[in-house]
């Protein structure tokens, strides 16, 4: 490299202005771009939405040759390439969705030096034909996106990523940049090792969003709770409400509008014109609420989103973090609010079990859900839990800006309650060979002679009525927290409750169970005083 650093620097900045139309780099972007433009290897940890793409897109444009981007997200490649082309970047991709002719065209463009960037699926790089092709062209850099996929301990392991270690051997002079939004310190080390990047510089952006206040309330009457939250704290503010299904998106948007909150729906079932209109209204107008499925938000860069509300449980902590991260980009105080209940857990477990995907996929999905539940049920600082999840050091004293810091939940010794509940599950299974869901178990515990209890003679069980000391809401809280603590599990299409490996220790009185108290007042009324 003969260029002076400030020359490459200004060239990078000029590219940022000219091609992408942005005024300045964000956070670590500048240092990363500078380092890679100068030929250095980099490992980048940055939250989703933090701006990882520019970290390799700009060096690809500034350095001679084609930037090769390895990404497992085949479904997004076409969109990414289209977006780049719209900016005048000569981009192409190669993956299994392509026909022969299409691939031939891309190959020819690459060899002729007519591509700034080429996106590849990782499995392509195992093929000799691909490696030969790359050897015959000029490569500006290798970008390895979603680099945590190389970790065999992670949720997203992809065997194809292991083969990427050969890139450094085969092209020792081409800089490599590995990027991820999820990495514990151990995964970070594994990335460095498995991708064989010992001299790479590490860039770690903070995942903390100090201006976002995290709050998770028990779900009772979610639409009403939401309305209370909006009226008391965010009247006239722009925000996003996430729901799981299209149907609840529609209903919630109607409900808000009827109650004087201007809201529009957004989901994949609406025609493209309506979607585009609602999105542009959200970007242009002050104080509009969008009620959406997770389809909404990709690439939305509205700085003054004052709240993100979840009426359904996100599938993973990554999803939760990404969605809530759309609030408060301008640094002003914002709220991430969620209502969450037992049905969310049961419903999501069902979705995982009856959904598509192989066993490994289901296990990963279940592990993702478990982490999300742990965040919901924690009695400690939510921000601390989030940061720890992403492998960053939380403040041991708490953040002072989440619900558990602001109003520390009381905990109680739930060992006896847990034993009662678990032994009811055991009794049903051992004595009757039956499995039931939470509703029936709680009815039995509370000694309720419902039609279904009578039908199955469950009032004859010795455990019938042993839980009269707790209210229904408290029992549902016990179930939720035992699920979150891995002391109870949900199974099958009917959401039946079953024991786990760890349940035995509680039943044998070898393990104590600390539970957080359910709030006495409805959550909607509470938000006013705690916010
Ligand atoms: P990631 O890959 O880390 O999830 P992206 O690269 O997709 O994030 O960027 C997220 C959003 O932020 C995009 O809409 C992008 O255009 C925008 N963005 C990134 N860097 C900048 C910047 N320096 N200035 C303005 N917007 C930016
Ligand atoms: Zn906190």
Image: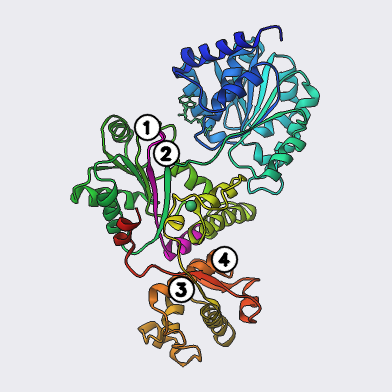
Q: Give the label on residue 326, or none.
A: 2
Q: Nearer the viewer, residue 360 or 505?
A: 505
Q: Mark 3 — residue?
A: 438
- The N terminus appears in which quarter of the rendering? top right
For the residues bearing labels 2 and 1, Cβ distance under 8 angstroms: yes
State the CA–CA distance, disc 2 to disc 1.
8 Å
Q: Nearer the viewer, residue 370 or 529?
A: 529
Q: Nearer the viewer, mark 3 or mark 2?
A: 2
Q: Mark 1 — residue?
A: 302
Q: Nearer the viewer, residue 468 or 438?
A: 468
Bin the neighbour count of mark 2 within 10 Å (Cα to Cα): few under 14, some 14-19, many 20 and up: many
Residue 235: give x, y in percent of width and height. Answer: 24, 45
Residue at 53% x, 67% y is 483
Residue 77 seen: yes
Q: Mark 4 — residue?
A: 485
Rendered position, 24 above or below 299: above
Rendered position, 109 above or below 120: above
Q: Earlier in the sequence, mark 3 or mark 2?
A: 2
Q: Is residue 446 magenta?
A: no
For the residues bearing labels 4 and 3, Cβ distance under 8 angstroms: no
The magenta segment: 327-352
State the CA–CA distance, disc 4 to disc 3.
16 Å
Left/right placement of residue 325 relative to residue 43 reads: left
Is the residue indicated by label 4 positioned so its CB lies within 8 Å of ligand 2? Answer: no
Residue 102: give x, y in percent of width and height. Answer: 57, 21
Q: Earlier in the sequence, mark 3 or mark 1?
A: 1
Q: Give the label on residue 397, or none.
A: none
- Looking at the rendered structure, the secondary structure element under dot 4 is loop
């Amino acid at each position: 490299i003969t260029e002076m650093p400030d020359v490459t620097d200004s060239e990078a900045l000029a590219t940022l202005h000219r091609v992408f139309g942005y005024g300045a780099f964000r956070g670590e972007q500048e240092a990363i771009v500078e380092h890679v433009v100068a030929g250095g290897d980099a490992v980048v940890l940055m939250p989703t939405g933090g701006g990882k793409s520019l970290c390799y897109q700009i060096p690809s444009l500034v350095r001679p040759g084609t930037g090769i981007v390895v990404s497992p997200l085949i479904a997004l490649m076409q969109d990414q390439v289209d977006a780049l082309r719209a900016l005048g970047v000569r981009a192409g991709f190669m993956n299994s969705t392509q026909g022969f002719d299409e691939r031939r065209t891309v190959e020819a463009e690459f060899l002729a030096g007519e591509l700034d960037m080429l996106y590849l699926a990782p499995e392509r790089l195992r093929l000799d034909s691909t490696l030969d092709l790359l050897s015959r062209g000029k490569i500006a850099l290798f970008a390895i996106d979603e680099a945590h996929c190389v970790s065999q301990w992670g949720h997203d392991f992809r065997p194809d990523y292991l083969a990427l270690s050969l890139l450094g051997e085969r092209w020792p002079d081409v800089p490599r940049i590995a990027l991820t939004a999820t990495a514990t310190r151990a995964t970070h080390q594994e990335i460095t090792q498995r991708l064989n990047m010992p001299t790479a510089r590490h860039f770690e952006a903070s995942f903390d969003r100090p201006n976002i206040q995290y709050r998770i309330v028990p779900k009772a009457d979610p639409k009403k709770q939401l309305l209370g939250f909006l009226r008391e704290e965010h009247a006239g503010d722009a925000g996003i409400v996430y729901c799981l299904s299209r149907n609840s998106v529609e209903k919630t948007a109607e409900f808000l509008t009827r109650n004087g909150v201007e809201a529009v729906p957004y989901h994949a079932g609406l025609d493209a014109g309506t979607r585009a209109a609602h999105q542009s209204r959200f970007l242009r107008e002050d104080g509009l609420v969008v009620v959406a499925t997770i389809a909404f938000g990709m690439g939305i860069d509205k700085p003054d989103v004052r709240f993100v509300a979840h009426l359904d449980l996100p599938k993973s902590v990554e999803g939760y973090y990404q969605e809530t991260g759309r609030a408060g980009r301008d640094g002003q105080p914002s709220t991430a609010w969620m209502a969450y209940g037992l049905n969310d857990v049961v419903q999501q477990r069902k979705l995982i079990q009856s959904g598509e995907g192989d066993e490994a996929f289901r296990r990963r999905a279940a592990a993702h859900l478990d982490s999300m539940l742990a965040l919901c049920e924690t009695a400690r600082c939510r921000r601390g839990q989030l940061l720890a999840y992403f492998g960053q050091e939380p403040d041991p004293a708490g953040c002072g800006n989440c619900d558990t810091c602001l109003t520390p939940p009381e905990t109680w010794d739930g060992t006896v309650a847990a034993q009662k509940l678990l032994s009811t599950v055991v009794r049903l299974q051992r004595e009757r060979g039956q499995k039931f869901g939470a509703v029936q178990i709680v009815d039995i515990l509370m000694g309720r002679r419902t039609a279904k209890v009578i039908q199955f003679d469950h009032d004859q069980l010795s455990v019938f009525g042993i839980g009269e000391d707790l209210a229904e809401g408290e029992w549902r809280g016990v179930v939720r927290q035992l699920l979150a603590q891995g002391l109870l599990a949900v199974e099958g299409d009917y959401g039946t409750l079953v024991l786990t490996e760890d349940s035995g220790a509680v039943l044998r009185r070898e393990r104590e169970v600390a539970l957080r108290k359910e709030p006495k007042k409805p959550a909607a009324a509470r938000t006013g005083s705690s916010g």
